[in-house]
Image (tube, helix red, strand yellow):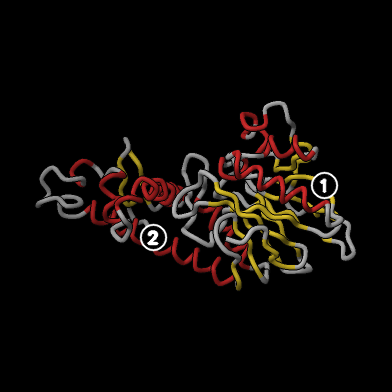
Amino acid sequence: MIRPRAIAAGAEAFAARTPTLPPATHTNSYALGGREVLLVEPATPYEDERREWLAWARGLASRGRSIVAIAVTHHHADHVGGARFFAAELGVPIWAHAEAVPRLRDVLHDVPVARRLSDGEVVRLDGPAPTALRVLHTPGHAPDHLCFLDEAEGVLVCGDMVAGVGTILIDPREGDMAEYLAQLERLAALGARVALPAHGEPIDAPEALFRRYVAHRGMREQRVLEALEAAAGGGGIGGEGGSGGAASQGGAALEELLPVAYADTALALWPIARLSLEAHLIKLEREGRAVRREGRWRRAAGGGA
């Protein structure tokens, strides 16, 4: 692993080990800008990695670059594990979306979010070629999720919207599958030249990847619907002749739907898949295509595919 690593004009990456979800092991931080720099993703909580991260950040000054702030894409632990520490060591403020403020209290303690970034605003950074970063509020994975677009260079810092390794979890406790898909479509329409994810390598031709993510979720949703159909017919999932199966109990529990909807997924990943399954079902419920009663799910009467 090469670090730090120049990615594009005005964009440098530093991958630090974090307690993230497998198969990822590191979270990428980015230095954006020329003379003035915005550091995105103060991720690592580990002391040895923090030392390396700080050496990288302080090394920017030796090249005539000044850090104006640290920005977080969202509040998840593998993205903000060093936020308070790095802000104090570097003497710079923290910027985030307003939705992040209550979610960061246990991380930042007495350190405030100095600037609350909002959708559409532009962060301007001075330099020989000034940098203008458009802020994009992209909820779905997390309510406070932000992306940053350098429109002149076509560089998009996309946090956890997609990954260069693995996939993205939509946790129903705070995520929203429909919103996530809508934001993927929005990002696909930007025409970015390269996307810089929090996990994995830079993504060339990101529009194609965004659309593959949407198509993958569409495939998974269809399998969820098929699992609901299986629960409704002939004794439930894995049942025999209608005696005591899921259908006779008025639908199927998540644990009964999971082996059908995620039959192509390794068993070790089923705890994560269960969360995504629930997120899909909630989306279908809101669309009137699935019904939940006492923890059991069934296909809505007349619900289209």
Which residue is at the far top?
A: 110
Q: How many marks?
A: 2
Q: Earlier in the sequence, mark 1 or mark 2?
A: 1
- Looking at the image, which residue is at 63% across and 32% down? 107
- Looking at the image, which residue is at 51% across and 43% down? 19
Q: Position of residue 223 (x, y in %)?
A: 33, 60
Residue 46 tag number: none
Q: Position of residue 37 (x, y in %)?
A: 80, 53
Q: Position of residue 84 (x, y in %)?
A: 69, 35
Asked where in the image residue 227 lies, by quadrant, the reply is bottom left
The amino acid beneath tag 1 is Val
Residue 68 tag number: 1
Residue 220 tag number: 2
Report the front residue among 131 and 46. 46
Real-space CA distance between mark 1 and mark 2, rounded to the nearest whole angstrom: 42 Å
Residue 124 visible from this viewpoint:
no
Residue 178 visible from this viewpoint:
yes
Q: Secondary structure at mark 1?
A: strand
- Looking at the image, which residue is at 87% across and 62% down? 130
**Pointer 1 local density, CA inside 10 Å: few below 14, some 14–19, many at least 20:** some
Q: Position of residue 193 (x, y in %)?
A: 67, 71
The amino acid beneath tag 2 is Arg
Report the front residue among 77 and 141. 77
**Quarter of the image containing the N terminus?**
bottom right
Where 287 sits versus 115, above or below? Answer: below
Tell me: 174 left or right of 187: left
Are the two marked residues, 1 and 2, in contact with CB atoms closer than 8 angstroms?
no
